[in-house]
């Protein structure tokens, strides 16, 4: 169990640029989640995958955000035309098939995005 | 919609003493899960303890225990014999047990706990 890995750890970008983050889940976990955490707040759910299928998306995930998990392993989260309000910590988590909370989520260290 | 409220933004406790962190939630569901997660400074979030709503017995994990009051929709965390390594943000979280929202954790705003030597 090498843990959930996220890359990069930090990203500074100018408003209007596109950014892409990567998440590598724990290898035997088929569920993968993206959360966003702003300063002083708890994480907010964005989306999750079971294998390669994106099963749920939050209304927080505007059309500038897109997530993929093409082969059911790693996932990418892309933000197009970044805005200052996108500045946050983006957390990835993974879990085994979740039979109603019996499989806890394992979180990565996050990618901190700063939009200037 | 479900909500999770943590009314204590910050707390402090002396090493070796006991502290209780509060959490209340709102839901119309009868079957769900509640969690406490710990996020140390600049480190990843880890699960501290988990409670299934249909179980009346309060969950315990070593020095960590919960007081789950389903009717009152209250889920407090007690940390006994506090250690310096317990210093962290603590998040209470709710998860539904139904349908496609399984895995969607709803977090409170967190309580910053400082353990003082």
Image (cartoon, coloured by chain):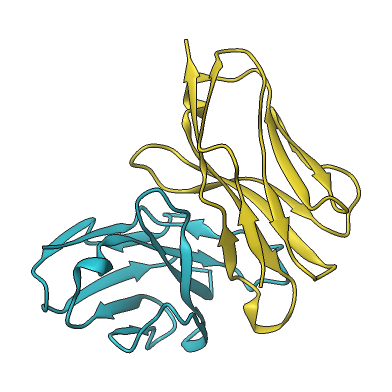
Residue occupying the far front of the picture = B7
Quarter assignment of residue A85: bottom left
Question: Which chain shows up in cyan?
Answer: A
Residue occupying the far right of the picture = B56
The residue depicted at 37 percent of the width and 43 percent of the height is B43
In the rendered image, is residue A109 in sight? Answer: yes
**Residue B67 position in % (x across, y down):** 80, 39
Q: Which of the pair B19/A8 is nearer the observer?
A: B19
**Colour chain B is painted in:** yellow
**Residue A20 position in % (x across, y down):** 22, 75
The residue depicted at 66 percent of the width and 52 percent of the height is B35
The residue depicted at 42 percent of the width and 54 percent of the height is A2
**Residue B78 position in % (x across, y down):** 70, 31
Residue B3, compared with residue B58, is above or below; it is below
Residue A64, compared with residue B57, is above or below; it is below
Q: Which of the pair A71/A11 is nearer the observer?
A: A11
Horizontal side of residue A39 vs A32, given as left or right? left
């Amino acid at each position: 169990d090498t843990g959930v890995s996220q890359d990069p750890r930090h990203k500074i970008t100018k408003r209007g640029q596109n950014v892409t983050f990567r998440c590598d889940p724990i290898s035997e976990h088929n569920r993968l989640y993206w959360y966003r955490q702003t300063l002083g707040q708890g994480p907010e759910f964005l989306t999750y995958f079971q294998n390669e299928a994106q099963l749920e998306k939050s209304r927080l995930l505007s059309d500038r955000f897109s997530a993929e998990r093409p082969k059911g392993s790693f996932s990418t989260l892309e933000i197009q035309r970044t805005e200052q309000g996108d500045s946050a910590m983006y957390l990835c988590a993974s879990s085994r098939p979740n039979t109603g909370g019996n499989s806890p989520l394992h979180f990565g260290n996050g990618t901190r995005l700063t939009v200037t | 919609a479900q909500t999770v409220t943590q009314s204590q933004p910050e707390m402090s406790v002396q090493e070796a003493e006991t502290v209780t962190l509060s959490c209340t939630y709102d839901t119309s569901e009868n079957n769900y899960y509640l969690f406490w997660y710990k996020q140390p400074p600049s480190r990843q979030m880890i699960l501290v303890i988990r409670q299934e709503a249909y179980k009346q017995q309060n969950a315990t994990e070593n020095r960590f225990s919960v007081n789950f009051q389903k009717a009152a929709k209250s889920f407090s965390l007690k940390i006994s014999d506090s250690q310096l390594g317990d210093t962290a943000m603590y998040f209470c979280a709710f998860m539904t047990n139904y349908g496609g929202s399984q895995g969607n954790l709803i977090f409170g705003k967190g309580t910053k706990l400082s353990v003082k030597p």
